[in-house]
Amino acid sequence: MSVIFEAAYDALLATWPHPTTVSELPTPYGTTHLLSHGVEDGPPVLLLPGGGATACSWRTTAAALGRTHRVHAVDLVGGPGRSRADGRPIRTVTDLTVWLDAVLDGLGVTSAAFCGHSYGGWIALRYALAAPDRTDRLVLLDPTGCFAGFRPGYLLRALPMLLRPTRARTAAFLTWETAGAEHDREVRRLDALAADLPRHRPVTGPRPTPTRLAALGPRALLLLPEGGRAQDVHRVAASATALGLRTEFLTGATHHTLPATLPTKALTDILSFLKPT
């Protein structure tokens, strides 16, 4: 792993709320690295980052939720960060389900709330559909591949970065997508540095059908950035609202300012939504 990336990861981790516990959990698909913070016996929440991002991007969310919950931010196996793909390859949605089952088992919890951004939101939603008994609630931050497809212009801009990822190309792409919106510079730098690391191909698949989504068991909160360029957030909102999901828009946010830079109101909404009843 890049020495520069490692140093940037450590520097960002040092700014996490105190105390933060670093741990590793063995799973059939590899060693999973987690950052844990908050009330020791509080309701558990798993935070899943987007593709190309790390657990470190959740520090603001972890600080807010940690006042009432036990928060576990995960580095995705096969993605950047400190999880290691030293087990079976994750190739299917079923593999992702079994992996998250193993993570919950390793934490010693029967179920948890899930909060996912982008690809992490897709993973969280897929897990909730497959394992509703282990999913307490869902918070989805601009989840991709769930309710609508990517905007063609977004994919066109992302193409050079996807074909040959480099630090410079990723940094330029993030600058374009965030378009001057407030963004955590340290998180952005780590995300750009991650482009130089080898990574495994993420699991992909068709969007869940409306019939499947209508049968979603856990309660869900969908938070969409008004300035997001990844997908048509109004189309996403219309689809989700028609299925009965609670949907809120985030003023001043874009797809890639999340989850590092969450408006105060969004953090309040998440805390309220996750409050035990």
Image: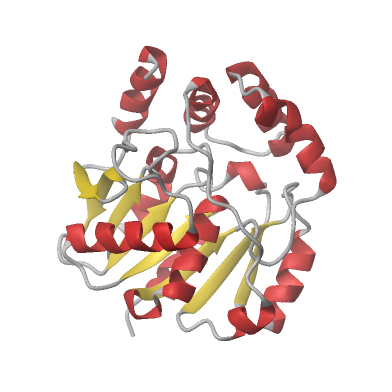
Which corner quadrant holds the N terminus? Answer: top left
Colour scheme of the rendered structure: secondary structure
Q: Residue furthest right?
A: 153
The residue sitting at the top extreme is 3
**Left or right of 63 in this view: 178:** right
> What quarter of the picture does the C terminus occupy?
bottom left
Residue 50 location (% of width, % of height):
52, 46
Classify residue 213 by image quadrant: bottom right
Q: Is residue 267 visible?
A: no
Figure check: 248 above or below 106: below
Q: Which residue is nearer to you in this view: 169 or 14?
A: 169
Query: Toward the viewer: 94 or 254?
Result: 94
Left or right: 149 in relation to 78: right
> Who's the residue at 60% across and 19% down the image?
166
Indicate the position of residue 236 as horizontal and vertical percent values. 72, 66
Query: In this orientation, does residue 29 appear?
Result: yes
Q: As rendered, which of 20 and 133 lies closer to the eye?
A: 133
Front residue of 253 and 217: 217
Please give the name of the residue rendered at 36% of the width and 27% of the height, measured from the top-left corner: 9
| Residue 19 in the image, given as x and y percentages of width and height | 19, 43
| Residue drawn at (48%, 61%) of the image | 93
**Residue in view at x 58 percent, y 36 percent:** 183
Residue 113 placement (x, y as % from top left): 37, 69
